[in-house]
Each structure stands twice: as C-alpha cells, then as structure tokens.
Amino acid sequence: MMHQHTFRTATKALSRNIMRAALTTLGIVIGIAAVITMVEIGKGSSGAIQRTIESMGANTLLIMPGQATNAGVSWGAGSSMTLTPGDCDAIARECPAVVSAAPIVWAGAQVIYGNLNWQPQQMFGTTPAFLAVRNWTHLAEGECFTDEDVRNAAEVCVIGQTVEHELFPDESPVGKVLRVGPVSFKVVGVLSKKGANMMGWDQDDILLAPWTSIKFRVTGAMVSHAPTATATISTGNSLSQIYANAGTSLFPALSASEGVDTPLQVRFINVSMIQVAAQSAEAMPQAISQITDLLHERHHLKPDAPDDFRLRDMTEISKALSSTTLLMGTLLLCVAMISLLVGGVGIMNIMLVSVTERTREIGLRMAVGARPRDILWQFLTEAVLLCFSGGIVGIVLGRTGSYLVTQLLHWPTELSVVAIVAAVFVSVSVGITFGFYPAWKASRLDPIDALRYE
C-alpha cells in the first residue's frame, strides 16, 4: 500500500507540469533512440560483412599441392602433383569436422557462343559439392550437373551471371551449347549473383563443369614424373615398329644412371586443388588437424616428414573484419552513451529544481508524519518514472529510425532485442543514479526550515 501511494503521489506531481516533464525526458529519449539505432546499424553491418565472408567461404579451407624440387631448385607452391580425387573423397568421408569437399581442376580457355566470345576469370572443373562448399546452392536458373555427369565426363556446364551477360545478353542460356576451347558444352544452369569478393574479384565471372570433362577433354590429362632406376621401352607402343626391322631398337638402351636422370612419364590423375567446408568457423582447427593426419596417412608421409600439401583458410581475414566491425560498433555505442549521460544530467538538474520549488510541500508532509525515507522514495520514483517513460518513447523512436535508415539509405539493420532490453535497464538505472542525490537532499530537509522557506 505504501508503494502504491508513493507511485500515485509521484505521478500526480509529474502531471502538474507535463511540459517540463516531457522536456526533461527529451535527453533520455534521444539517448535511448540513438543507442538502439546505432546498435541495430552496427549489427546489420556486421551481419552484412559476415554474409560476405560466408559467400567467399568463412568456414572454407583450401588444400593446395606442395612444391616440386629438381636438382635443389624449388618450383614453388602448387608445382607438385600430390592431390587426387581420392584424397577429396576420403576427406569428405573420414573427417567428422568436414561438411563437404570438392576437387578443383583449373583451366583457362576462350568461351564462344555464336559471334560472341569471353574468357572467364575462373574456369573450374569440379563436382556438385562445390556449390555446397561455397554456399551457392541456390541457382538463378536451371540446375547443376550431377555426379553421374562427373563420372561420364559429360559435356555440360554451369555459368555465372557475368558470363551470361556477356554471351547471352538477350536470351536464356539454359539448353544452349557454347564452345570451351575445342569442346562443345551444354549450359544446364546459371548461378545466382554473388558480386565481387573482398579483393575485388568478380565471383560471377565463372564457369563450372565436371572436373573429368575439363581435365580430359579441355586441358588433357596431366602427367607427373615418376623416377625409375631403369628405362623400359614397351614393344607394344614403340616407335621402332614403324620400320621394317621391328626387332631392332631405334635408340640405344639407357644406362642405370641415365634412367634416373630421365624418368619416364607416368599418367597420374591429379587435381589442382581441393576446397573443403568445415562445420563452422570454430571447427576449422579441428578440420585442419583431421585433414593433415589423413593426408599424411594417404600419402605415406613419415611423422617428421614435411607436408606435400599446403592448407589455406580465411580465419585471419574473418578475424580482422570481425574486430573492425566490433570496434566500429563500440565507437557508435560510446557516442550514443554520451547522449544518455547528458540526459541523466538533465534529469538531476530538473529534480534539484523540483526539490527547491516544493520545499514547503516537503516540510508540510514531514510535519504530518512523513518519514525521510518516504520523501526519498517519492522523489526517486519520480526520477525513475521520467527515465522509464523516456526509455519507452526512445525505443519507439529508435526502431523507427532503424526502419527509416533501411528504407531511405538502404543500410543493413537488424533487430536487436538485447539493445531494447538494455535500453529499458539503462533508462531505469539512469533514473536511480541521477535521481538519488535530489531525492536524498529532499529527505534531509529540516521540517521547520522547510515550512519557513519562501
């Protein structure tokens, strides 16, 4: 009953001067609205950056082949052929932290349709799992090629929207046949738009096809050098058979040392790269460890032997962008908190004025039996009511501001329930913090001096 009476008394006291109460809460309204708007803009920007990273593959891992060395000379990263489609299948099957994996065969060729031609920045031979790895499962038109197409080296492809714009400006590309180098490919799908990545590369300037088609039909199967101690010439495929005396070798036999120096070329089905999607960005270290152990086992590497492959991830880029976004969000929040501080000072100022104006009222209440704590609670309740009311109005204005920013400026924003709850908590806290001193000062007045106050 006492608290209800205090609440009614505080409400009546504030209603006697509504205009002053509204102006007093204006600082809190602006502060709360600024906090909510800034937090939601920061959260929307962070979400947009995170989606950009995910479109590039925040949880993706690139497995590159190692380097080849000849006579002490290193040919650089990727010059050795150490990755196979079997490695990709084993990673997807035996690594629990991996969601999917796709082999990639690089190629570069002119793409021709009618009298138009274009050379995509990226021409990949891969599997349908590539779209899952890159979070690109939604196609703008048509469908992706299948695993059966990969097994059969089918002449089908999927193109990005930049390629579509350059080669098919006025018609749908699905079902059309274009030429990739010397090979004709049927377009079965068009990828959805991704735009440029963080390094400025056009992700839509791409052509995807089964890796078997790219490797064996467009570029031809690559070969690796397998060192052997002796050279053997197959009589079934010897150039000497074109002569009448087929039993005589056209070239002299190689010695053992010459055989080591000039190894035979052995056909080896390799891939240029393997792209892997981990279950999450947090699972990247676990995925890296599992992949490293598996490839060591498959490539028969000793525990102390150097890796014949290289792992690359986007963890550092993701961390850098996340830290930048957090810094900007914190800066915006600090700027908004200054408005709350100014609003709190305004509350304290008006409450001190109110105590001075109502000194005789305070003396009269004490004379009829009100205790100092009753006076303290009354003025503290008034301060909290002012700040709470300002917080509610600020929430409405903050949400309205976020909506207008999205509609008019096209900036990304996201609803932040945490910011709204925190705004209510902060508004009440500001009322208690900045209203306590005026309320305490009112409760310490002497009743006789207060009644004599003019």
Image (tube, grey):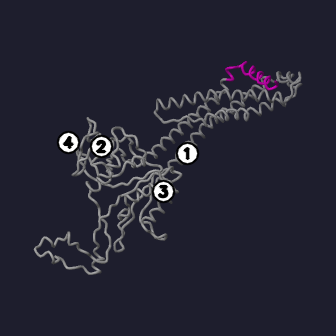
Quadrant of the snapshot with the C terminus? top right
The front one of 178 and 267 is 267
The front one of 35 and 3 is 3
Q: Which mark is residue 163?
A: 2
For the view shown, which residue lies furthest in the top direction?
Answer: 16
Residues under labels 1 and 4: Cα distance? 51 Å
> Is 365 drawn above or below residue 316 in the view shown?
above
Indicate the amino acid at tag 4.
Gly
What element does badge 2 sit on?
helix
Question: Is residue 266 shown left or right of residue 56?
Answer: left
Q: Which residue is mark 3?
A: 95
Q: Which residue is mark 1?
A: 326
Indicate the amino acid at tag 1.
Leu
Whichever of labels 2 and 1 marks the residue nearer the N terminus, that label is 2
Quadrant of the rendered image containing residue 267? bottom left
What element does badge 1 sit on?
helix
Foreground disc of the pair 1, 4: 4
Residues under labels 2 and 1: Cα distance? 37 Å
The front one of 230 and 401 is 230
